[in-house]
Amino acid sequence: MASKRYNKVLKMDILHREDLKLGGFAGLKEHRLVMDDKVFKGRSNLGTWQGIGDFVYLADAQFNPLGDTTLHDHKEVDVISVMVDGRVSHEGSLKNGQSLQAGQVQVQRAGAEGFSHNEINPDTTKNRMIQLWVLPEKSGECADYKFYPLSENGLLRIYGGDAGQGDTFSSQTLIDVGYLKAGEQLKIEQNFIMYMIKGTAIASGQMIGDGDLLRGESVNIEVRADAMIIVITERSGT
């Protein structure tokens, strides 16, 4: 069903961040774009999308200068933070004192024991961070942590894959993050959700830019201005 929030292009939908309500709490403002019923049933914001696989949440946040989230808890969820601009410092029970800078990603596994933390902007200017939540495939895991510096070009797998590898937390839900240069192309030939964080591109014939969330069965991306993106898919056969 079409609405003013969606532009149907072949087998692809687009959700524009600025069409959604700006919310927030404590020292930050954010647009929530994905609020899956697995976690938010009956309390999701109007216009937000369902995820795919075990991916259940995406928010695009800006912290106020010296703003923080205040101490809060997570349990049985994997919390992924993608730093876009500025810095965030963490205080709490998992990797206390860890600092995240632009171009870096952290994945915090709450597990059964959970963790408490406060996310803090240590600077006197606003920052920007994308946060995603993924439900672990097995409950009862121990709390854990992974850190990924992004390269200047290319996508990096930061979540999902076989249980036998240790580079990422294993999952059928796959998440890739990174930068693409103007002129580069990306082809996705399976069910996907993609978030355009920076830059502009042509997606299967339609212009997209900062704050556009895409979903569909396939897409061809032609980057027009240097871009930063997140791509969520599922392993083949799931």
Image (cartoon, rainbow, N blue to C red):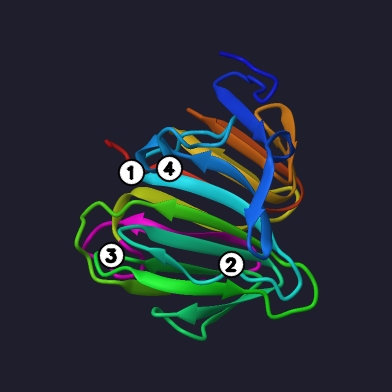
Cα separation between marks 4 and 3 = 22 Å
Whether the residues at callouts 2 and 3 have beta carbons within 8 Å, the answer is no
Range shown magenta: 147-169
Binning the other alpha carbons within 10 Å of mark 3 as few (below 14), some (14 to 19) or many (20 upward) gives: many
Q: Which mark is residue 233?
A: 4
Q: Amino acid at mark 1?
A: Arg
- Whether residues under marks 1 and 4 lie with C-beta atoms below 8 angstroms apart, the answer is yes
Relative vertical location of residue 215 with respect to residue 22 in this rendering, above or below: above
- Marks 1, 2: nearer the viewer: 2
| Residue 139 falls within the magenta-colored stretch | no
Question: Mark 4 falls on what kind of element?
Answer: strand
Label 1 element class:
loop
Q: Under tag 3, what secondary structure? A: loop
Query: Given the image, on which type of amino acid does mark 4 rest?
Result: Thr
Disc 2 or 3, which lies upstream in sequence?
A: 2
Where residue 136 sits: x, y (%)? Answer: 29, 54
| In this rendering, the label closer to the viewer, 3 or 1 | 3
* Residue that numbered label 2 is attached to: 69
Distance, label 2 to label 3, CA atoms, is: 21 Å
**Residue bearing mark 1:** 235
User: In this view of the protein, can residue 77 be seen by the observer?
Assistant: yes
Q: Are marks 3 and 1 in contact (CB under 8 Å)?
A: no
Q: What residue sits right under mark 3 in the picture? A: 111
Disc 4 or 3, which lies upstream in sequence?
3
Give the mark nearest the N terminus, 4 or 2.
2
In the image, residue 150 sits, relative to residue 24, either above or below, namely: below
Amino acid type, mark 2: Thr
Residue 60 as seen in the image, left or right of residue 75: right
- What is the C-alpha distance between the residues marked 3 and 1? 22 Å
- Frontmost residue, 16 versus 25: 25
